[in-house]
Image (cartoon, rainbow, N blue to C red):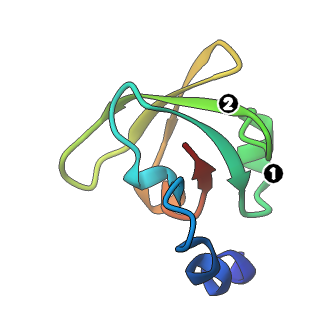
Amino acid sequence: MQNIQKNMHNYAFDMAIITLKDMHKNEWGTVYDVPDLKLLASLGIRIGKSIKVLSKSFASGPMILAVNGRSIVVDKNVAEKIIVRR
């Protein structure tokens, strides 16, 4: 997890690499890096998986995502730790 945050500046050169939190509604991406949390793996959020933002609140509410043909909810605090490639 700490490695992701420390290396985020290394991703900056590639404009296609962003956090999941920064994605927009109806936008697709591929998981590029993810914290080592068993919950995320059980939800299908793994490196290389396609992910789509179905809904995103303007405040600090959760995000609704499509992963592996299912809808899941992820807190924005967790979403900012997941790195995706557009």
Q: Residue at x 72, y 63 (%)?
A: 35
**Side of 32 relative to 9 (left or right):** right
**Side of 67 relative to 80 (left or right):** right
Q: Which residue is mark 1?
A: 38
Q: Which residue is mark 2?
A: 50
Viewer-side residue, 25 vs 63: 25
At label 2, the amino acid type is: Ser
Please tell me whether residue 68 is drawn above or below residue 6 in the rendered image: above
Q: Secondary structure at mark 1?
A: helix
At label 1, the amino acid type is: Lys
Dot 2 or dot 1: first in sequence order is 1
How packed mark 1 is, by other alpha carbons closer than 10 Å (few <14, some 14-19, many 20 or more), is: few
User: Which quadrant of the figure contains the N terminus?
Assistant: bottom right
Residue 52: give x, y in percent of width and height. Answer: 52, 28
Q: Residue at x 43, y 31 (%)?
A: 27
Residue 30: give x, y in percent of width and height. Answer: 66, 39
